[in-house]
Structure formats: structure tokens, C-alpha cells
Amino acid sequence: MSVSKNIKAGILLAQVRGRSPVVHHLTNWVTIYDCAQVVKSLGASPVMAHALEEVEEMSGIASSLVLNIGTLTIEFVEAMKKAARAANKKGIPVILDVCGAGATSLRDRKCLELINEVRIDIIKGNASEIGRVAGENVRTKGVDSSLVQADIKNLAAKLATRKECTVVVTGEIDIVTDGKRCFLVANGNELMSKVVGTGCMAASVIGTFAAVEQDLVKAGVSGLVCFEVAAELAAKKSPGPGSFREKLFDCLYNLDAKTVSRMQKVRC
């Protein structure tokens, strides 16, 4: 896989560290600490504010908004909508992780409510989650991806075109598309699938890069590259998932542009 010269992930990493943007989250309670720490390790500033009474105000001081329905409730989704409307009004990007879409009818319904009632700039999920919100009859194993018979690259592009957004599909090879452009990212390590929360962390990383880059396709690709290059480095020092999780934060913190440029695996 050749390195795409259009993606300068290391430069965006430097911008994240230089600007330290505030990334507002309404996210998964299971992985909330890791989402905050991954943003902090990159040099940005996470805030995890969920209360219906303050989400508008918090979005007002943020540079991006990350929503994750992993531990959804009806009230939680209403808070997400309220935060997203404030973000839309301010003009900052909104990232939605459709965590577990395809597992239950409630998740499916609330994902579609969010996508249809507020402006979502980046929709992120694994293959079965994206397949489900794109209208395919697929099921998700809890929050783990299941087999999708359709061409997921084509499905993602159609969803991106229909909703005028960027779609990110995570997996062994990630897909990032806005319906016109499509990039494939082949970085990462198998240990990522053995740690709870790496998918949620990926959404937070994408939200962090979207906070400093208006081209959301480039932001998505660059965020995934940096996250997954760090994962490759962490895996070399880790005999199992426990030590890998710890080393992942260290490797993100110590990541430099030269290493990113040397290791990134991106093609159009």
C-alpha cells in the first residue's frame, strides 16, 4: 500500500498540540476515561459534560463535539441533540459514533434521529454499524462488527453523499469518504481489537483532529493514522492487552511527525 502524499498527518498532529482545542464529549460511560485520556495524550483538552442543563454552554466553548451512543438512554440522546444544535449554530464539527447500531431497535432509532434531526459532520462506526445506518439489514454483535455482505466502501460513499457528511468505517482497513474522495488506512495492530474502547477512542481522536482541520476527510484519515501508528509502536512493547492499553497512551504522547510520515499506510 503506497503512502498518499495528500495526507500530512504529522502536520495536523503538530497543530493539535499547538492549539490544544477543547473537544466536548457526550460519550460511552464504559470508555469515558480512555476517551478523555487519548485526547489529552495528543495534546488537546477533553471535556466530558453530559448534563442537559449545561451541554449548550459547553459546546459554545468547544472546537468540536463527539457523540457516542454506546451507553444511550432516552434523556442522554436528548442532551446529545441539544449539544449538537449548539455546535451546529457555532459551526463546529459534530462527530457521531454509532456504537452498537444494528444491535437493538432503540439504537437504530436513536441513531437515525440524531442523523436526521441535527447536522452530523462525521459518522463513524464499524462495518455492520455503518451498514445498518445506511439501511442494510445487518445485525451487530453487541458493539462488535459482524459480517456485511454488501460492498461497505460503496455503502459508506452513498451514505456520505446522501447525508452530505464524511463517513468513517473502522476495521482491519479503515475507510474514510465524503462520497467523492475515498482513503483507505491500513495502519493498526490486532491488539486494538482485544482492548475495550479502542473504537470509542478512535472517534475521540477523529474529533480532536477535526477541531483543527476543516477538511474533515483529511482530519479523519490523519487522526486514524496517528492513533494506529501509535498502536503499532505500543504493540511492539506489549505482551498483552493490559500493557498495550497503557503503552498506547505513552506512544501517542511521544509520537512525532517524522515517525508518522515514515509509518503511515494510506492510499486513495
Image: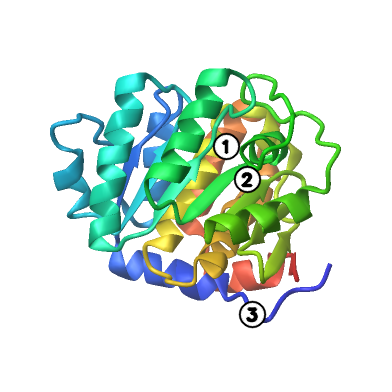
Counting residues from the start of the chain, the first of labels 1 and 3 encountered is: 3
Given residues 180 and 33, the one toward you in this image is 180
Q: Residue at x 55, y 43 (%)?
A: 248
The reply, left or right, for residue 55 in relation to residue 126 is left
Q: Camera-side residue: 180 or 3?
A: 180
Relative side of 89 to 107, left or right:
left
Sequence-first disc among 2 and 3: 3
Q: How crowded is the residue under tag 1: few (<14 C-alpha within 10 Å), some, or many (20+)?
A: many
Task: Find disc 1 in the rendering and name its residue.
Answer: 198
Between the residue at mark 1 and the residue at mark 3, the CA separation in whole angstroms equals 26 Å
- Mark 2–mark 1 Cα distance, whole angstroms, equals 13 Å
Q: Secondary structure at mark 1?
A: helix
Residue found at x 41% / y 56%:
208
Marks 2/3: CA–CA distance: 26 Å
Q: Earlier in the sequence, mark 2 or mark 1?
A: 1
Instruction: Say whether marks 1 and 3 touch (CB < 8 Å).
Output: no
- The three-letter code of the residue at mark 2 reads Ala
Q: Amino acid at mark 1?
A: Thr
What's the amino acid at mark 3?
A: Asn
Q: In which quadrant of the rendered image does the C terminus lie?
A: bottom right
Q: Is residue 21 left or right of residue 134?
A: left
Residue position marked by numbered label 2 in the rendering: 234
| Tag shown at residue 6 | 3
